[in-house]
Image (spheres, helix red, strand yellow):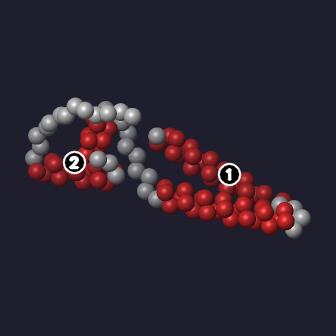
Amino acid sequence: MRIRDKRLYIRVTEEEGRFIREKAQKQGMTITDYIINCSLDKNIYILNGLEDVILKQKEIGRYLDKMILITKMNNLSDDALRPVIDGHIKVTEMIGSVIRKVK
């Protein structure tokens, strides 16, 4: 883990300070992290709602697991579920790809 033990002091107007605080808050970052990312020309990504998408995707996965279990318990073929399972896998991989690109 990186330890930031050096301090850097800058002077800003009240309006500039408010602007920086608001921008950092909108990004879900501390002022320190926001300024460092901006200064180092790092891209800042906002993925509003991604946590909700991930939660729903996990919920769908749990339901699919239950459906597969029921079909196996009743000696039924899961062929009808295959397109849904494949679609779920594809969406999960796409979400993972987005997350990896952002990190």
Q: Are marks 1 and 2 in contact (CB under 8 Å)?
A: no
Q: Is residue 38 visible?
A: no
Mark 2 Cα within 10 Å, few/some/many (few <14, many 20+)? Answer: some
**Any mark on residue 89, and which?**
1
Label 1 SS: helix
Q: Is residue 64 visible?
A: yes
> Between 76 and 44, which is closer to the camera in this rendering?
76
Residue drawn at 60 percent across, 59 percent down = 57
**Any mark on residue 20, and which?**
2
Residue drawn at 71 percent across, 62 percent down = 64
Relative placement, left or right, of 1 versus 39 is right
Relative placement, left or right, of 59 versus 10 is right
Q: Of the residues shown, which amino acid type is indicated by label 2?
A: Ile
The location of residue 82, given as percent across then percent down, is: 78, 57
Relative placement, left or right, of 14 versus 65 is left
In 3D space, how far apart are the residues under numbered discs 1 and 2 (Cα atoms)? Answer: 40 Å
The location of residue 52, given as percent across then percent down, is: 50, 61
Total number of numbered labels? 2
Residue drawn at 44 percent across, 52 percent down = 47
Mark 1 Cα within 10 Å, few/some/many (few <14, many 20+)? Answer: some
Counting residues from the start of the chain, the first of labels 1 and 2 encountered is 2
Figure check: 91 above or below 81:
above
